[in-house]
Image: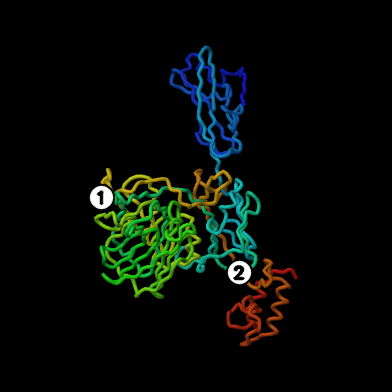
């Protein structure tokens, strides 16, 4: 909105000494980025031939163009409105000093930031009763299709420490968009024991992938490392095949020639896994995933993204093949996986051979040293990982977008080299970096903006850039003796304790497990006077 301000006290603002100077420049001081629905203050600074600058905001003529998503006030207060995605508004300033006139402009990009405004239970809170729900308040209306068990996860620590391999995933009663800006994780009927809990809301962004051409024998050479040679094994990748695939068109390949090892491959429109225990003894499983239109070929698998995975258990000797989270085939092998050779992604043969090469795009390649079941595959297939998940032995996200290295995001750091050398100029065997269209997504708003979720303890969440998980934790610590879980130990709880006491006594186990669960404070498998003394100490009333 255009505003004029006639300033009679111009000399006082600029300084009397400025009258002996000439105006030579004008600039607008302030950030070039602004969030929607915010107010940011900008200053107008006049430069004189003496080299001095003075603030002249109040004596300048300010306006905004095209003034569709913002306006500016007398004091340089730049107010932004709700925007559909990203918009640019230009702040203009006009300032006259005697006969001297200068103008200045500043382009300000207004961003639609989708973040978390509040959460209940509060971060790091200690609850004396389990919550019936977890509620997240968002800054924008969320896209309901992105709110699900893949993008919202609840985990308990089991031992008070997260990410040490024994965390337990909690399946909530439901995850719903209770209104456009609130996600509710429903916990009614879910048993939550005293422990630490972590809730994570996914802010994964689309990234990059690698495009392979079989005729050029494209390959990423990872090399050989013990971390990639586990006895328990799961391989995962997102695959966009563009051709039927020739003989042994590899997605992931780790053995030398016909020596022991394993591979996950795309061949004659089938997904397959082969493992060799010795040079000539091997076993394999192949998908019979066919389209209804053409039962003899897997045209369904060509031209669109599919998540493929296999797992091998050395305990059961069972190999399982998954496509899009479905169990497609299971076979039993001769026992164990032996290992040899470098690992390759897209073409495992070195030197590269066309017969082993893959036509299409690969993304999100993961190697695990554990057997992942169908719930694990389904939970994580549509989201990016951090790289420190328990059991993750190798993770190539392919988001570098350029250069000769595909980084392994785990601590094992088995980085892959594009082509057959790491020279900056590359070689003919280099796959090409492309923008990924694999269905890796996080929670987004109705305009497609992904959650800006990084959380450091204060709201709103985020670092100002779309993408980033919102993660926080809370603790459940019931008050000992609070049988009815109403947050106190009162006469209602005493009535139940008295009943348990009458049914038990020293060395006598009560008939109801609830008595032991709540009132056996000294854990000696009874409810007696020793437990009563502890109950009385915890008694909070009311009487």
The residue drawn where x is 54% and y is 64% is: 196
**Residue at the extreme right:** 543
Q: Give the x, y percent position of residue 480.
A: 63, 72
**Label 2 packing within 10 angstroms: few (<14), some (14-19), many (20+):** few
Question: Which quadrant of the figure contains the C terminus?
Answer: bottom right
Residue 385 in sight in this render: no
- Residue, disc 2: 191
* 454, above or below 224, in the image: above
* 412, above or below 370, in the image: above
- Nearer to the camera, 116 or 287: 287
**Residue at the extreme bottom:** 507
**Label 1 packing within 10 angstroms: few (<14), some (14-19), many (20+):** some
132 with respect to 457 (left or right): right
Which one is earlier in the sequence, the residue at label 2 or at label 1?
A: 2
The residue drawn where x is 31% and y is 69% is: 276
- Residue, disc 1: 421
Distance of label 2 from label 1 (alpha carbons): 55 Å
Q: Give the x, y percent position of residue 417.
A: 30, 52
**Residue at the extreme top:** 99
């Amino acid at each position: 909105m255009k505003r004029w301000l006639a300033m009679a006290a111009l000399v006082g603002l600029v300084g009397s000494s400025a009258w002996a100077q000439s105006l030579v420049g004008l600039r607008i001081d302030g950030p070039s980025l602004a969030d929607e629905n915010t107010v940011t203050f900008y200053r107008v600074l006049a430069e004189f031939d003496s080299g001095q600058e003075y603030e002249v905001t109040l004596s300048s003529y300010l306006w905004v163009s095209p003034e569709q998503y913002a306006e500016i006030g007398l004091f340089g207060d730049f107010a932004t409105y709700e925007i559909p995605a990203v918009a640019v508004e230009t702040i203009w300033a006009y300032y006259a000093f005697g006969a001297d006139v200068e103008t200045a402009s500043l382009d300000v990009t207004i961003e639609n930031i989708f973040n978390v405004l509040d959460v209940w239970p509060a971060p790091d809170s200690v609850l004396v009763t389990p919550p019936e729900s977890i509620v997240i308040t968002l800054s924008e209306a969320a896209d309901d299709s992105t709110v699900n068990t893949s993008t919202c996860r609840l985990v308990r620590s089991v031992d008070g420490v997260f990410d040490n391999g024994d965390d337990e995933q909690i399946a909530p009663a439901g995850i719903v968009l209770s209104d456009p800006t609130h996600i509710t994780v429903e916990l009614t009927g879910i048993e939550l024991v005293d422990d630490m809990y972590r809730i994570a809301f996914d802010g994964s962004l689309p990234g990059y992938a690698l495009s392979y051409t079989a005729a050029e024998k494209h390959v990423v050479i990872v090399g050989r490392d013990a971390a990639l040679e586990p006895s328990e094994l799961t391989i995962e990748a997102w695959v966009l095949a563009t051709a039927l695939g020739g003989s042994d068109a590899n997605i992931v390949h780790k053995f030398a020639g016909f020596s022991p090892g394993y591979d996950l491959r795309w061949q004659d429109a089938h997904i397959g896994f082969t493992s060799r225990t010795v040079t000539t003894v091997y076993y394999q499983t192949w998908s019979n995933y066919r389209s209804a239109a053409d039962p003899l070929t897997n045209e369904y698998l060509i031209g669109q993204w599919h998540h493929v995975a296999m797992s091998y258990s050395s305990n059961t000797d069972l190999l399982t093949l998954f496509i899009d989270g479905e169990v497609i085939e299971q076979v039993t092998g001769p026992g164990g996986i032996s290992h040899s050779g470098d690992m390759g992604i897209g073409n495992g043969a070195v030197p590269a051979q066309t017969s082993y090469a893959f036509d299409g795009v690969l993304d999100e390649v993961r190697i695990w040293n554990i057997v992942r079941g169908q719930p694990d595959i389904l939970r994580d297939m549509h989201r990016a990982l951090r790289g420190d998940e328990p059991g993750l032995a190798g993770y190539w996200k392919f988001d570098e977008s350029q250069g000769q290295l595909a980084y392994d995001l785990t601590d094992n750091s088995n980085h892959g080299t594009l082509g057959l050398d790491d020279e900056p100029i590359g070689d003919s065997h280099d796959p090409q970096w492309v923008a990924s269209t694999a269905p890796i997504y996080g929670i987004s708003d109705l305009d497609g903006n992904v959650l800006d979720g990084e959380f450091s303890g204060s709201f709103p969440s985020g670092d100002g850039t779309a993408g980033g998980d919102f993660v926080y934790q809370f603790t459940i610590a019931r008050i000992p003796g609070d049988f009815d879980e109403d947050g106190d130990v009162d006469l209602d709880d005493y009535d139940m304790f008295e009943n348990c006491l009458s049914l038990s006594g020293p060395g006598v186990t009560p008939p109801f497990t609830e008595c032991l669960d709540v009132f056996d404070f000294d854990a000696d498998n009874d409810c007696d006077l020793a437990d009563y003394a502890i109950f009385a100490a915890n008694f909070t009333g009311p009487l």
